[in-house]
């Protein structure tokens, strides 16, 4: 062995390299590698290399929807060992994203197990399982028909597709995001049905404008649903490739308990998780940026889906609280569109029409290659079938030639000479077993020949006519449309550029002003507007006019109270239900009709056929409550009301129910009228006030 001191040792070599030049070259190489091989999607199939390799390898493993799930770690290992020589975590993260319905408008992987959420990561790959989702088959279908260029893998031992066939515009449907060196991309998801309709329209009308396309593709369709407020930024992005739009959660204001008004959130902006929202609400309340919230709870589960319930304090306007939530939490956020994609390995920023054209050009190329492949296969098969027909016509002579030949080469030569066959036809006959050759039917072979000739003629017409090619592309796009979910999830709202978070929400806390709560005989309930009360007082202090009522209706109770007080609704079952006055629908004036107001039973969630409200009193009143029942029981209740949303004011006997409830101070009289027109009246003090649990007297 040579040593450094021996003559055979190689001399020491030191090369002087300019650091600046080396850094420039190395950095450019690294940047191009990230751009081409990691961060940016291809405009044709909408996939990054790691996503494409995962789908291709899973299809090679036979992990179709009808196949059972396999361990995700097995998929990761196959992809890493054969196609993607990078870390297993990058492969698994890409697999998880393609399985997430929160991220993908059309998931491509069917995951089994804990694949995580927007707030929490997935379980390790050894604990989860995966297979291809049905839409993924549309991405990889017919790869064995030379649809795309196949390129060597990293060590030239395997071949992989440079792009997938993609039977639907996956880039526009599922969007993409990534950060490269010096650039980034962020494409919004869209509705698959709308994207396909837009692509078909562009096929039929190559000169279509953005306005034309937006008739079919009006805006993004986010996996999480919610609202998109304002389409100006969407149009800008469709025209230039850059723009932004506002996403807003779906929130409903309503009663979250018997006495509490609140806000229920059922859909969030794209890529916003419920835990993030709850954390931001807590921070905003602590920092006093948001007022009027008494509690916020996350009731999200797998069975019922997303549900965030935010309780609003009594005396606060839920609309104003919601506006604060939009302003200070991720319930309203922006999505920045930056359509940077690879076109021929070159990053470009494209609007919606160039993106659709890139995809359609790809599909035309795929269809052309597939048609050429099928044409060649049909021609090859026709050539063999014609040879078989010749052989079948004189099968005995064919068998005799084969038997009397010395070897295969001589048999081939003699068949070619005697029957005027080509080498391929002769070899095909020789490769067949004798029993198969003799069982061939001339009629069946001639029928196959005729069918092949028709197919060849149709394929030649298709390849020769660009119009037919485009029509076939449109037909296959519509077939793909029928195989994916096309229900729109996101509601598009036109706006003048201002959203709820930008408008002044007004004061969240409602002033404690005088008002009146009105109950009609048909159960309609509403409160008067404080401004109307003030106007009435300024006019002379007389009581405001009684609200006009619907036909066949009458005013059964009017309670003078204030906007931040409570009233008690007495029901036929002897219960008192507490109502926040501020939560009741208000009338703009003191004389508006009650026809549009809700029934108090519907407001309280009662079944009017089983229990209805028979009276309304002020919760802070000091006068006893008088009750009358259908069986002639009368009771006066001591006005000591517990601070509960629901409590009993009388113990009823079976079959009995309350028919009337009103305040009865000492000195007043109680009047009972029977169904037969008989009347009974007596001083109220004859009925001694009792506790809530008492049953009254007859």
Image (tube, rainbow, N blue to C red):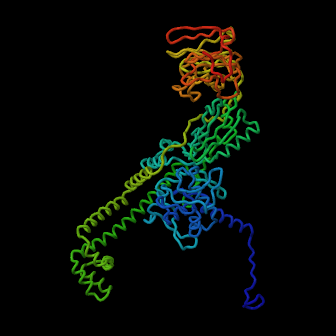
Residue 514, how many percent across, how many down? 69, 18
**Residue 604 visible to the viewer:** yes
Quadrant that contains the N terminus: bottom right
**Residue 598 visible to the viewer:** no
Residue 51, how many percent across, how many down? 56, 60
Nearest the camera: 400 or 338? Answer: 400
In the picture as drawn, the residue positioned furthest to the right comes out as: 5
In the displayed structure, would residue 609 be above or below residue 165? above
Name which quarter of the figure residue 529 lies in: top right
Disc tally is 0
Name which quarter of the figure residue 29 lies in: bottom right
Nearest the camera: 442 or 96? Answer: 96
Residue 146, how many percent across, how many down? 44, 66
Tell whether 306 sits left or right of 45: right
In the displayed structure, would residue 542 be above or below residue 530? above
Name which quarter of the figure residue 305 lies in: top right
Residue 301, how many percent across, how many down? 60, 46
In the displayed structure, would residue 57 be above or below residue 514? below
Nearest the camera: 122 or 478? Answer: 122
Residue at the spot x=68%, y=23% of the render?
Answer: 566
Quadrant that contains the C terminus: top right
């Amino acid at each position: 062995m040579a040593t450094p001191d021996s003559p055979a040792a190689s001399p020491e070599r030191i090369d002087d390299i300019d650091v600046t030049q080396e850094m420039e070259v190395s950095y450019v190489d690294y940047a191009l590698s990230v751009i081409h091989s990691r961060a940016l999607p291809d405009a044709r199939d909408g996939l990054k290399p790691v996503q494409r390799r995962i789908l291709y390898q899973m299809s090679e493993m036979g992990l179709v929807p009808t196949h059972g799930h396999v361990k995700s770690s097995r998929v990761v290992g196959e992809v890493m060992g054969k196609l993607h020589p990078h870390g297993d975590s990058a492969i698994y993260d890409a697999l998880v994203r393609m399985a997430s319905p929160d991220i993908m408008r059309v998931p491509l992987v069917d995951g089994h197990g804990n694949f995580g959420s927007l707030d929490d990561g997935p379980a390790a790959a050894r604990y989860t399982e995966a297979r291809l989702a049905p839409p993924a088959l549309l991405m990889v279908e017919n790869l064995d028909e030379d649809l795309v260029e196949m390129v060597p893998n990293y060590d030239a031992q395997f071949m992989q597709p440079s792009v997938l066939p993609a039977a639907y515009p996956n880039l526009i449907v599922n969007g993409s995001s990534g950060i490269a060196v010096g650039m980034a991309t962020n494409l919004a998801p869209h509705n698959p049905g709308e994207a396909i309709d837009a692509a078909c329209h562009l096929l039929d009308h190559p000169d279509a404008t953005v306005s034309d396309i937006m008739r079919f593709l009006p805006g993004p369709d986010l996996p999480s649903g919610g609202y998109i407020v304002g389409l100006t930024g969407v149009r800008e992005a469709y025209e230039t490739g850059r723009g932004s739009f506002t996403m807003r959660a779906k929130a409903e204001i309503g009663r979250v308990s018997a006495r509490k008004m609140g806000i229920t959130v059922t859909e969030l902006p794209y890529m916003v998780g419920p835990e993030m929202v709850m954390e931001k609400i807590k921070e905003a309340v602590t920092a006093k940026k948001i007022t009027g919230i008494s509690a916020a709870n996350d009731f999200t589960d797998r069975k019922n889906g997303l549900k965030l319930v935010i309780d609003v304090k009594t005396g606060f306007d839920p609309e104003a609280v919601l506006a604060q939530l939009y302003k200070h939490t991720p319930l309203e956020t922006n999505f920045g569109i930056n359509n940077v994609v690879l076109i021929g390995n070159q990053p470009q920023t494209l609007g919606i029409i160039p993106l659709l054209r890139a995809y359609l050009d790809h599909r035309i190329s795929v269809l052309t290659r597939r048609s050429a492949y099928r044409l060649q296969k049909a021609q090859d098969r026709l050539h063999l079938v014609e040879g078989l027909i010749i052989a079948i016509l004189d099968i005995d002579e064919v068998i005799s030639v084969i038997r009397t030949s010395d070897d295969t080469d001589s048999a081939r030569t003699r068949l070619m000479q005697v029957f005027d066959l080509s080498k391929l036809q002769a070899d095909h006959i020789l490769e067949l077993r004798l029993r198969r050759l003799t069982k061939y039917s001339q009629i069946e072979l001639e029928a196959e020949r005729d069918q092949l000739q028709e197919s060849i003629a149709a394929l030649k017409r298709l390849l020769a006519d660009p119009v037919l090619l485009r029509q076939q592309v449109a037909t296959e796009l519509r077939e793909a449309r029928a195989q994916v979910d096309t229900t729109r999830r996101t509601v598009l709202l036109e706006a003048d550029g201002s959203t709820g978070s930008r408008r002044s929400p007004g004061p969240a806390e409602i002033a404690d002003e005088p008002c009146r709560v009105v109950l009609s005989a048909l159960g309609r309930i509403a409160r008067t507007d404080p401004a109307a009360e003030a106007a009435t007082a300024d006019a002379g202090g007389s009581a405001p006019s009684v609200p006009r009522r619907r036909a066949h209706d009458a005013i059964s109770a009017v309670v003078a109270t204030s906007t931040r007080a409570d009233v008690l609704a007495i029901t036929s079952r002897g219960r008192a239900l507490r109502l926040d006055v501020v939560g009741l629908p208000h009338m703009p004036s003191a004389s508006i009709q009650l026809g549009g107001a809700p029934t108090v039973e519907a407001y309280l969630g009662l079944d009017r056929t089983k229990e209805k409200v028979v009276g309304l009193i002020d919760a802070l009143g000091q006068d006893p409550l008088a009750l009358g029942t259908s069986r002639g029981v009368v009771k006066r209740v001591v006005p000591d009301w517990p601070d509960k949303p629901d409590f009993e004011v009388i113990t009823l006997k079976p079959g009995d129910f309350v028919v009337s409830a009103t305040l009865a101070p000492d000195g007043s009289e109680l009047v009972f009228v029977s169904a037969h027109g008989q009347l009974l009246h007596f001083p109220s003090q004859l009925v001694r006030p009792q506790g809530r649990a008492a049953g009254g007297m007859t």
